[in-house]
Image: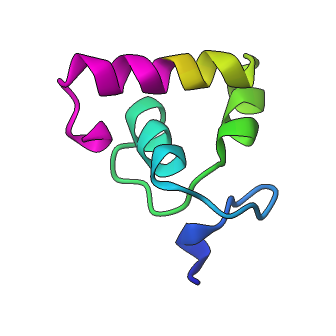
Amino acid sequence: MSDSDLCRQCGAKLGQDDKAIYRKMVLRTADSFLCIDCLAEYFGVSREAIEAKIRYFRESGNCALFR
């Protein structure tokens, strides 16, 4: 497992959604990431708000990161 597979803040194992939402909301070319919980903390929002964005991007079908 490489460092890009772990949250750089808490060390949690990352899934594709973690990486995709980080790239969408923070830096498209990122090679290190925050998990959804740490990303929510970074933006000062709830985990549910981040999950809602993930659903929105996936359902819209307009973002290649969520296909």
Q: Quadrant of residue 20?
A: top left
The residue under the point 48% across, 36% down is 26
The residue under the point 54% across, 69% down is 4
Q: Answer above or below: position of 65 versus 30.
A: above
**Position in image of residue 60 (x %, y %):** 24, 17
**Position in image of residue 35 (x %, y %):** 66, 47
Q: Is residue 54 left or right of residue 41?
A: left
Name the main secondary structure of what is drawn in magenta: helix
Q: Nearer the viewer, residue 34 or 18?
A: 18
**Quadrant assignment for the N terminus:** bottom right
Q: Is residue 61 left or right of residue 19?
A: left
**Quadrant assignment for the C terminus:** top left
Residue 15 among those drawn in magenta: no
What is the span of residues highlighted in magenta in the rendered image?
Answer: 53-67
Residue 65 among those drawn in magenta: yes
In this figure, what is the number of numbered marks? 0
Residue farthest toward the bottom in the current orientation of the protein: 1
**Position in image of residue 32 (x %, y %):** 54, 61
Figure colour scheme: rainbow
